[in-house]
Image (cartoon, helix red, strand yellow):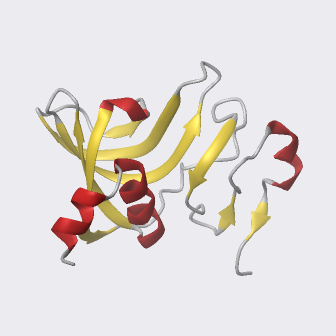
Amino acid sequence: MDSVAYNRLMPAESIFMKAGNLRRLCEVTFREGKTALVEPYAIYTAETKRRLYLWYQLASDPPEEPGWKSPEAVQVVSARVRDETFSPRPQYDPFDSQKYPVMHFCIPTADGRQRWADASRSLASKQDVHVGG
């Protein structure tokens, strides 16, 4: 199966996670038709009980400022893994439990630390684990 057909069959969140795991850029499309080229970092539930993406946006159509964005997951209707790669930004901090109370998916930090997906808040003591070192 070619990658275009594969991307059409998978939900946007699954494609976003695949891109993050591979450290490849992801092109997302919103309900209203806007597209964005992003570095995929995390999927989490905020205090508002809304499921959100965390990404660093590089470009968009229509154009808007690049930077950290956390759009609601329900607003993203499709995603596509791109060939271009990225390295985690030093500012990326998935361990902020005030900002990211429940983490569903996240990539390791630039220095290799990994916050595991939370089954509940009681797992907070298991969140800071160093990978590969």
Q: Looking at the image, which residue is at 70% across and 55% down?
A: 115
Q: Quadrant of residue 73?
A: top left
**x, y percent for residue 42:** 52, 49
| Front one among 114 and 104 | 104
Q: Is residue 90 above or below residue 111?
A: above
Q: Is residue 42 above or below residue 6?
A: above
| Front one among 7 and 125 | 7
Q: Residue furthest top?
A: 48
Q: Quadrant of the image for the C terminus?
A: bottom right
Q: Looking at the image, which residue is at 79% across and 40% down?
A: 120
Q: Quadrant of residue 126?
A: bottom right
Q: Is residue 56 above or below residue 62?
A: below
**x, y percent for residue 2:** 18, 77
**x, y percent for residue 30:** 23, 34
In this rendering, would 115 be left or right of 81?
right
In this rendering, would 38 be left or right of 87?
left
Q: Looking at the image, which residue is at 57% across and 52% down?
A: 105
**x, y percent for residue 71:** 39, 31
